[in-house]
Image (cartoon, helix red, strand yellow):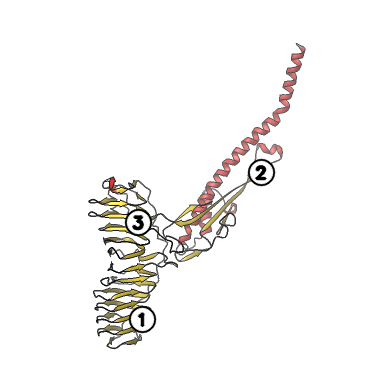
């Protein structure tokens, strides 16, 4: 009996002696769990801040006072972390994307397309203090990057029919379709249409046999912002006041003298208009070769038969015509200030590295695709990948008339205007359409090969990479 009492007393003593260590271990486990919880919160904040910083990169040229760092810090602060606890690096200072090169998107550049965010904060411990550990520094890191988006057709109308297909036609796209309308008829496919895309995302619903779509549309998707709103329009100057008319009857170079109008009606001339300010230019001869130097022009009309007209970058009140001259647009930006833009395509028109901008006071656009027409957007610079850019202030509709051999490589951006695609529009490389609403009346093929562009698709999205 006495031996058993002695054993019980020893067990009690051992238990009492072990209690501080057991409590310490339990306390340490509680502290570790708490710190893991804090770590998860920090990681969420770091992820969100990195995404916000990367998302700001395309808008650096248009968001006054907002930087990559301020955008990231604002999101970190909204998650409860003071700026003193947050470090934003562009480019990253650690990891596989350290020092990644300049990111040229839109009208401004960032040091890198990668944004690193580090959240670091000292956290007090509770039970671990028994062992002399009163605080622990918890750290979370995230890296986000601006990447090419997967969508290539965006219909921005918030409540009507965003995309309408008429007749027995087809749409084939290597990328995705996004329709922002919350209408039950946001997407309407009339007739025996077929739609083959990477995806179709619709905020509202659609009308049409689901078998017409491959894959079927996903409905009820949250609307997304205008993906090209970061673009900054070129400056449009006040047109000069015409002072007289120059009638050209012989070949040669004509110098600008006080914004004169110009008429070219003779045949088989070789005429160069020197760079400068010009009034209205009328080209009506037969077999003429005409070069328009860079500068500012009034209304340019091309009504001649045969021959060719070469345009240089600049500002034009309008460019129209009904003739058969071949029209070539040298690389650069063309601003249409106050009239229509309808490059004649009967004999084929072309331009490589070109962006056509329609200002807020411009008229309609009728883009014809003759048998050999080919237009390609710039491969670098502020308007990389942008072929047609209609100012949001211009709501006139656009029409693209293509055929099986005409090619239009680049983005068509008209966020407040309707666009109609007639005929058979084919694209050898890529095309992007961002419009208020879209009507397809033909067989359209849209590619997504952005390998010729320095920064990939002009449609950007931010994604976590580390």
Residue 428: x %, y % from top left: 35, 62
CA gap between label 1 and label 2 equals 72 Å
Label 3 belongs to which residue?
A: 153
Crowd class of label 3 (few under 14; some 14 to 19; many from 20; radius 10 Å): many
Residue 171 higher or lower than 29, as above or below: below
- N-terminal of the pair, mark 1 or mark 2, is 2
Q: Nearer the viewer, mark 1 or mark 3?
A: 3
* Residue found at x 29% / y 83%: 262
Query: Element type at marker 2?
Result: strand
**Residue contact between numbered discs 1 and 2, judged by CB atoms under 8 Å:** no
Label 1 belongs to which residue?
A: 277
Residue 17: x %, y % from top left: 73, 27
Crowd class of label 1 (few under 14; some 14 to 19; many from 20; radius 10 Å): many
- N-terminal of the pair, mark 2 or mark 3, is 2
CA gap between label 2 and label 3 equals 53 Å
Label 2 belongs to which residue?
A: 135
* The quarter of the displayed image where residue 368 is located: bottom left
Q: Disc number at residue 217?
A: none
Residue 460: x %, y % from top left: 43, 57
């Amino acid at each position: 009996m006495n031996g058993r009492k002695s054993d019980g007393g020893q067990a009690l003593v051992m238990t009492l002696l072990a209690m501080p260590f057991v409590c310490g271990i339990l306390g340490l486990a509680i502290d570790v769990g708490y710190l893991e919880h804090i770590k998860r919160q920090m990681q969420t904040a770091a992820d969100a801040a990195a995404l916000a910083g990367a998302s700001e990169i395309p808008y650096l040229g248009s968001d006054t006072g907002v930087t990559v760092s301020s955008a990231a810090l604002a999101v970190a602060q909204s998650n409860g972390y003071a700026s003193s606890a947050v470090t934003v690096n562009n480019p990253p200072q650690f990891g596989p994307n350290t020092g990644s090169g300049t990111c040229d998107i839109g009208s401004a550049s960032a040091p890198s397309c990668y944004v690193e965010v580090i959240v670091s904060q000292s956290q007090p411990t509770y039970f671990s203090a028994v062992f002399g550990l009163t605080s622990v520094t918890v750290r979370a890191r995230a890296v986000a990057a601006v990447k090419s988006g997967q969508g290539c057709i965006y219909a921005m109308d918030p409540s009507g029919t965003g995309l309408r297909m008429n007749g027995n036609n087809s749409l084939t796209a290597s990328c995705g379709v996004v329709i922002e309308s919350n209408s039950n008829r946001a997407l309407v496919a009339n007739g025996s249409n077929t739609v083959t895309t990477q995806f179709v995302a619709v905020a509202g619903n659609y009308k049409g046999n689901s078998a017409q779509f491959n894959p079927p549309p996903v409905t009820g998707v949250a609307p997304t912002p205008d993906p090209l709103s970061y673009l900054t329009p070129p400056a449009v100057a006040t047109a000069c006041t015409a002072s007289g008319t120059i009638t050209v009857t012989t070949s040669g170079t004509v110098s600008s003298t006080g914004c004169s109008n110009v008429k070219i009606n003779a045949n088989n001339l070789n005429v160069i208009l020197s760079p400068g300010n010009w009034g209205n230019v009328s080209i009506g001869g037969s077999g003429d070769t005409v070069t328009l130097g860079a500068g500012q022009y009034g209304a340019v009309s091309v009504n001649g038969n045969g021959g060719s007209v070469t345009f240089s970058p600049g500002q034009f009140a309008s460019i129209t015509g009904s003739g058969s001259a071949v029209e070539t647009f040298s690389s650069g930006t063309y601003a249409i200030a106050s009239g229509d833009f309808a490059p004649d395509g009967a004999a084929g028109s072309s331009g490589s590295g070109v962006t056509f901008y329609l200002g807020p006071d411009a008229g309609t656009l009728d883009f014809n695709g003759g048998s050999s027409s080919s237009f390609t957007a710039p491969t670098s610079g502020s308007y990389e990948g942008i072929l047609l850019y209609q100012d949001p202030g211009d709501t006139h509709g656009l029409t693209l008339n293509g055929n099986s051999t005409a090619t239009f490589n680049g983005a068509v951006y008209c966020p407040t205007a309707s666009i109609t695609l007639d005929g058979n529009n084919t694209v050898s490389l890529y095309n992007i359409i961002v419009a208020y609403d879209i009507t397809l009346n033909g067989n359209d093929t849209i590619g997504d090969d952005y390998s010729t562009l320095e920064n990939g698709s002009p449609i950007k999205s931010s994604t976590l990479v580390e």
